[in-house]
Image (tube, helix red, strand yellow):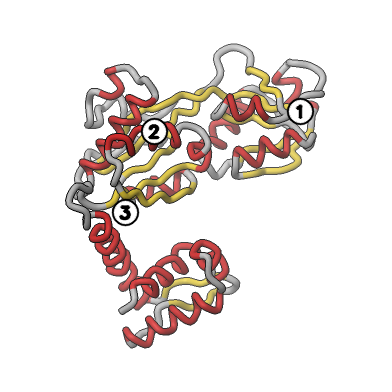
Amino acid sequence: MDTRYVQSFVTVVESGSLAEAARRLDLTPAAIAARVRTLEEELGATLIKRVGRSVKATEAGLKALERARAVLREVRDLRASAGDDAPLGELRLGVSASALTGTMPIVLARLYRRMPKLAVFMEPGTSKHLYHRVVNGDLDAAFIVKPQFNLSKGYAWRLVTEEPLVVLAPPDTAGDDAHELMRTQPFIRYDRNVWGGRLADQYLRQHGIAPRERLEVDGLMGIACMVSEGLGVSLVPDWAPDWLDSRRVKRVPLPGRAPLRRMGILWARHMPHSALAEAFVEEAALALNLPDSARGRLSGTPNENAPET
């Protein structure tokens, strides 16, 4: 059995689309469909079906899905551990899109200096999606927004950075009153389906601000680019100050104490690769100069797992 065909099947189910799976695997939709058909013939079962414009797993496909993921993981571990001096296995890491341009390059650079032959599988996504990927055992750790609920005892959380909400505005926008800008200018809303977007929405509702909403976007870099083109203002976390300063935007602080988007690392303590996840946590703390209290303990505490306020 060709594991590339297994990978194609898993990617189709996870993305819900032959076209999206083709994009992720850098193939044509026809090639993806052919791979899945070949796998179905080998297994003697129909694995996927069309539902409207999307593709979903059949009952047989759902039964095969977890085993297929396990097979792919074992293959990656085998490749990663082939060298005598390589760490055992592969670190499966989820990363929110904003962290890819913020803290993640710094952390990975330090981690690779410690483990130059470490294999890392990195999956981008929203914090909500990546949280469930860790809980389901698909990822070892995830760099995400802090969950706004208690974690179970099998998981740990480590705070990495706190990002205050700020208003992004085009550089030629008159005035520096954040509330007035959000009330009077066209507004680009940070998607309320993601945890950071909910924090921004909560702030607007608490202060009775009803913005002139023009767009709702999931993607901080995209929002910043739209603001720079004069499409409106937005309320977002101050996630990459240096990068934002390089764009044609100005950052307007909120009056008083701004809400904080808390970014950190969630990992499963009971997974076979928990040692690799904890090494990643330790290097993140060192790379970002976190205090000893934030890096010295590798297990969650009741305070760390408390709901975010």
The amino acid type of the residue labelled 3 equals: Asn
Alpha carbons under labels 2 and 1: distance apart: 31 Å
**Residue under the point 59% across and 12% down:** 256
Q: Which disc number belongs to residue 136?
A: 3
Distance (Cα) linking label 1 and label 3: 42 Å
Report the disc number at residue 170: 1
Alpha-carbon distance for marks 2 and 3?
Answer: 25 Å
Tell me which numbered mark, 1 or 3, is placed earlier along the sequence.
Answer: 3
Pick out the residue farthest to the left: 84
Q: Which of 283 and 125 is in front in this view?
A: 283
1 or 3: mark nearer the eye? 1
- Residue 240 screen position, x and y as percent: 55, 29
The disc label shown at residue 107, or none? 2
Q: In the image, what residue occupies the spot 40% across and 49% down?
A: 122
Q: Which residue is drawn at 47% across and 71% down?
A: 56
| Up/down of 242 relative to 192, above or below | above
Q: Earlier in the sequence, mark 2 or mark 1?
A: 2
Q: What element carries label 1?
A: loop
